[in-house]
Image (cartoon, rainbow, N blue to C red):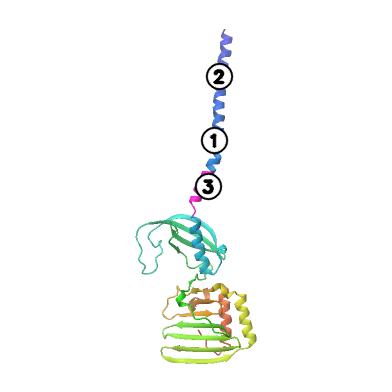
Amino acid sequence: MIHLHSQSDWARRVEAVLLVATTLIAADLSAARAVPLSIAQQASIEQSERPNRHIQRSVRQDLAQRLGLSIPQVRLVAASRQTWSDGCLGIAAPDEICTQALVEGWLIQLMANGDIYDYRTNATGSVFRLANNQPADGSIVPTPILTENLPRPLEQGVLFRSIASGGLLGHQAEITLYEDGRVVSQTQNIQTPSQSRSFRVSRQQVEQFRQLLNQQQFERFNALDYSGSAGAADGITVMLISGNSVVQYADMVEDSLPSALQQIIQGWRNVRCPSAAIARLK
């Protein structure tokens, strides 16, 4: 009897162990079936931590326009939710009045031409600002030229023109290169009457300058203004005009302009100042 009782007790123990094992296996199987749902939830959470496509496109389009690029050339690098200190997203312009309420939004990092640009937006993207106006290579980020500030189209037979103005004396100079090689310069300021002079460069120089405009793709800078951050009273603002493009810059930031634009400016200087004895004109 004692032996039979021991067998029965052993059987019950085995049964209990099997029950526990079955319960554990069932729990593991349930957890395994829950994995796809967990992954889907995780993806949903990750997606909610990124700005929607409308916000992304708005800031990419803005930067592309500033840099003279196409939207696909501007790439989203990173984005994070932020709470900005005021209605100006924490980067108010001088003398700008901002609402003082906290603003939920995004910090978005974009890459273009190998440089990183930070944009701040509100939650919907209806308000956004470029936080850094100078990329890593030191070049200046432009703004669009206002339509009302665009110059008149070039006349027939004119290849290129520069118009410079500003300075303490109200300096203004207009220099025009004609297809036939003529260069006409008209200058004036508030103290002297208008002065005009002209000379001629070779057809070869004209063609070389035309090729430079094409090689450096002058048209990609069309309607861009690189003078917005330069506000010195004695500064000179220069507008360069071709048959299909207009760009403006401040002379004091010339060394920080894109290298292609600097090459065009130097090429233009060689045309309008053919002799080192001629003073540098703007």
Is label 1 in a helix, a strand or a loop? helix
CB within 8 Å, label 1 to label 2: no
Image disc number at residue 13: 2
Mark 2: few/some/many CA within 10 Å (<14, 14-19, 20+): few
Is label 2 in a helix, a strand or a loop? helix
Horizontal relation, residue 98 to residue 39: left or right: left
Disc 1/disc 3 C-alpha distance (Å): 18 Å
The answer to whether residue 118 is magenta is no
Q: Position of residue 148 (x, y in %)?
A: 45, 76
Q: Earlier in the sequence, mark 3 or mark 2?
A: 2
Residue flagged by tag 3: what amino acid is it? Answer: Ala
Residue flagged by tag 2: what amino acid is it? Answer: Arg
Residue flagged by tag 1: what amino acid is it? Answer: Ala
Mark 1: few/some/many CA within 10 Å (<14, 14-19, 20+): few
| Number of the front mark, 1 or 2 | 1
Q: Earlier in the sequence, mark 1 or mark 2?
A: 2
Q: Is residue 280 visible?
A: no
Circle 3 is placed at which residue position?
A: 43
Which sits in the foreground, 190 or 262? Answer: 190
- Numbered range of the magenta stretch: 40-50
